[in-house]
């Protein structure tokens, strides 16, 4: 089968790989019907994910059809349409039993990082009973595609931000994760969502899709100037207080500082961004703000809940899929996605030519 592999030195290649098979009785084999490229895939290629292993098939955002299940998989059968969770978790360890499934002692981010992922024709999903979410018949592949990673990340970011009805929420970064976070902040009752980004086109998407009430472009000659501009703008919009909750999804130069600067005293700062460099927490500058910082990323515990919201028509981020490429052209798709070419937000990777059905 065709599969996209990275070598650990910044190079990717579409190669032929054997079709995966059941290794453990808790496995499932899924035929990939639609996948996507995530910014964290780029982080792996750039060497910014230390736990990632070379010569691994990339990719962790996908939907597909179950082809085969191990003997211990009871909740799924061949023919089921499923969305797949980026997190692998057992459901039985100390952390899983307490709801912290992204800290699972047997898993974590495995697919496309430490084991072969989804940018291929077939994928082996370990611990499938926990890792698969059934897609209702009336939900399209496009609507379900982003469930297992960026949509769950946006939902988790809003959840741990402790948003209360009527709050003002500032979301830093109007890329795909940030846009998902804005949509989910609405579900938690935010009265005002402020989107901050230096990309005018992405801010326009946030307004067009009704995700942000106000957009702020804090572009400046340097990160410090951008942060100052963002802080002043958010204060102007909140009677001088700052945002009640902040969700940091950008991971850019200076955006971590921007996050705590735009927050009001006693706010929660929810950090969903994946940084390629260490960040500084300058405690002497923030004494008295009494901020709560929460870090995370995707947390797999919420996928059934989010799928129910999609099925009910309350959450739809399929507008993020702006371009499509067959698996045959995935190397070009990576270049296109990384360059944000033609306003690209997310690319959908379809099966190889001739296998679309």
Image (tube, rainbow, N blue to C red):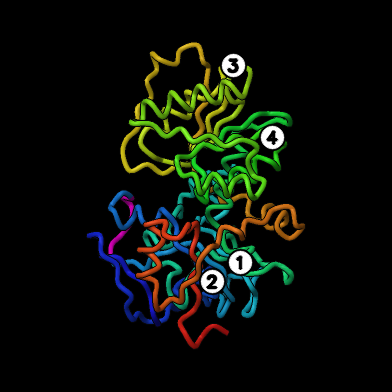
Give the label, 3 or 1, closer to the camera.
3
In the image, residue 287 above or below residue 337: above
- Looking at the image, tell me whether mark 3 or mark 1 is earlier in sequence order: 1
- Looking at the image, tell me whether mark 4 or mark 1 is earlier in sequence order: 1
Give the label, 2 or 4, closer to the camera.
4
Give the label, 2 or 3, closer to the camera.
3
Residue reaching furthest right?
Answer: 312
In the image, residue 253 above or below residue 47: above
Question: Between 341 and 129, which is closer to the camera in this rendering?
Answer: 341
Residue position marked by numbered label 2 in the rendering: 34
Which of the 4 image quadrants contains residue 194?
Answer: top right
The answer to whether residue 231 is visible is yes
Which of the 4 image quadrants contains residue 227?
Answer: top left
Please name the residue shown 58% across and 70% down the image. Answer: 72
On whether residue 53 falls in the magenta region, the answer is yes
Q: Label 4 near label 2: C-beta < 8 Å?
A: no
Q: Relative to 244, is 256 on the left or the right? A: left
Residue 263, percent across and down? Answer: 54, 24
On whether residue 7 falls in the magenta region, the answer is no
Residue position marked by numbered label 1 in the rendering: 142
- Looking at the image, tell me whether mark 2 or mark 4 is earlier in sequence order: 2
Please name the residue shown 73% across and 31% down the image. Answer: 165
Residue position marked by numbered label 4 in the rendering: 190
């Amino acid at each position: 089968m065709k599969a996209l592999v990275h070598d650990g030195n910044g190079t990717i290649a579409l190669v032929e790989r054997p079709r995966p098979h059941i290794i453990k009785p808790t496995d499932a084999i899924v035929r990939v019907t639609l996948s996507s490229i995530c910014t964290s895939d780029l982080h792996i290629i750039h060497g910014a994910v230390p736990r990632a292993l070379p010569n691994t098939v990339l990719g962790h955002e996908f939907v597909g059809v179950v082809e085969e299940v191990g003997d211990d998989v009871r909740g799924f059968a061949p023919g089921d349409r499923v969305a797949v969770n980026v997190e692998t978790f057992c459901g039985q360890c100390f952390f899983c039993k307490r709801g912290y499934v992204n800290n699972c002692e047997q898993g974590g981010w495995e697919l496309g990082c430490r084991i072969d992922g989804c940018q291929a024709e077939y994928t082996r999903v370990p611990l499938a009973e926990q890792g698969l979410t059934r897609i209702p018949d009336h939900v399209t592949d496009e609507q379900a595609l982003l469930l297992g990673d960026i949509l769950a990340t946006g939902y988790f970011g809003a959840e741990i931000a402790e948003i209360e009805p009527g709050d003002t929420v500032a979301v830093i970064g109007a890329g795909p994760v940030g846009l998902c976070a804005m949509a989910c902040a609405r579900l938690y009752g935010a009265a005002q969502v402020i989107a901050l980004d230096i990309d005018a086109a992405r801010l326009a998407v946030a307004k067009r899709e009704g995700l942000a009430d106000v957009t702020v472009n804090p572009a400046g000659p340097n990160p410090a100037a951008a942060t100052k501009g963002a802080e002043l703008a958010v204060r102007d919009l909140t009677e001088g207080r700052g945002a009640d909750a902040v969700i940091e999804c950008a991971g850019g130069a200076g955006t971590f500082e921007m996050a705590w600067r735009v927050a009001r005293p006693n706010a929660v700062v929810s950090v969903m961004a994946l940084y390629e460099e260490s960040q500084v927490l300058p405690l002497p500058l923030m004494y008295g703000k009494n901020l709560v910082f929460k870090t995370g990323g995707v947390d797999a515990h919420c996928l059934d809940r989010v799928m129910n919201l999609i099925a009910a028509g309350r959450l739809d981020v399929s507008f993020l899929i702006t371009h499509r490429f067959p698996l045959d052209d995935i190397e070009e798709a990576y270049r296109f996605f990384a360059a944000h070419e033609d306003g690209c937000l997310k690319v959908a990777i379809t099966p190889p030519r001739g296998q679309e059905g």
